[in-house]
Image (spheres, rainbow, N blue to C red):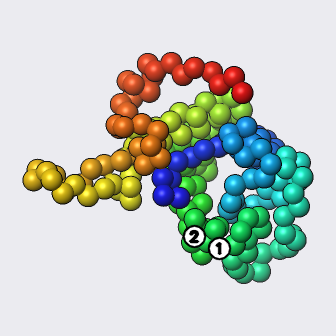
């Protein structure tokens, strides 16, 4: 949570298919045996996906009658250290996604009928969020410059993946080499 980098995205016709896509991405990206500490908003699909991709059965299912903290997978202390005692990070990410990608907003003319168009808009939104958008919560204080107090940082900068805020031109003109794994 220190970097706020979005590391996986699942886009499919059902919550379960989208969750399977996320876990398969995480599995390819360095979590082959078990998922990393995971938080969900509880809308469904994540339990079945975890079983399908990792063979791990999360906690019991139930209906919502209130909000209670329950770690489904991972060490409870580690999960709480990463996420805190609420789903605020998940909900904030969902709000940011809806604000920056109108295809996610309800009752809009920008609604995606084609899944590929939806995937493309989500990929673009993730690129801008991770590389080109400085977040106030990630800025670092500058002590040796009298002209400014803060150095802005993007999630990718906080994660050490880049050393600068990318421009839209850089995003559109950079060719990414395919990952052969």
Q: Is residue 45 visible?
A: no
Please name the residue shown 46% across and 21% down the image. 174
Q: Nearer the viewer, residue 79 or 62?
A: 79
Q: Position of residue 104 (x, y in %)?
A: 60, 46
| Residue tagged 2 | 81
For the residues labelled 2 and 1, the Cα–Cα distance comes to 6 Å
Q: Position of residue 46 (x, y in %)?
A: 79, 56
Please name the residue shown 22% across and 55% down the image. 142
Q: Position of residue 72 (x, y in %)?
A: 77, 67
Mark 2 vs 1: CB contact within 8 A: yes
Q: Which mark is residue 43?
A: none
Q: Secondary structure at mark 2?
A: helix
Q: Is residue 179 above or below residue 99?
A: above
The answer to which image quadrant residue 75 occupies is: bottom right
The answer to which image quadrant residue 162 occupies is: top left
Q: Is residue 50 visible?
A: yes
Please name the residue shown 60% across and 44% down the image. 7
| Residue tagged 1 | 77
How many numbered badges does the structure rendering display? 2
Quadrant containing the C terminus in the rendered view: top right
Q: Position of residue 165 (x, y in %)?
A: 35, 38
């Amino acid at each position: 949570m220190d970097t706020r980098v979005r590391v996986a995205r699942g886009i499919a016709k059902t919550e379960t298919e989208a969750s399977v896509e996320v876990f398969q991405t995480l599995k390819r990206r360095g979590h082959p045996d078990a998922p990393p500490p995971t938080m969900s908003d509880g809308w469904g699909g994540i339990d079945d996906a975890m079983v399908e991709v990792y063979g791990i059965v999360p906690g019991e299912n139930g209906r919502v009658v209130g909000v209670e903290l329950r770690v489904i997978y991972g060490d409870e202390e580690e999960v709480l250290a990463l996420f805190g005692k609420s789903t605020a990070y998940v909900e904030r990410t969902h709000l940011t996604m809806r604000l920056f990608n109108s295809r996610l907003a309800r009752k809009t003319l920008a609604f995606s009928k084609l899944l590929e168009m939806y995937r493309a808009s989500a990929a673009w939104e993730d690129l801008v969020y991770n590389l080109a958008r400085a977040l106030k919560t990630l800025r670092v204080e500058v002590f040796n410059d009298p002209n400014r107090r803060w150095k802005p940082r993007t999630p990718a900068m906080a994660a050490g993946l880049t050393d600068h805020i990318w421009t839209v031109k850089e995003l559109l003109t950079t060719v990414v080499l395919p990952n052969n794994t």
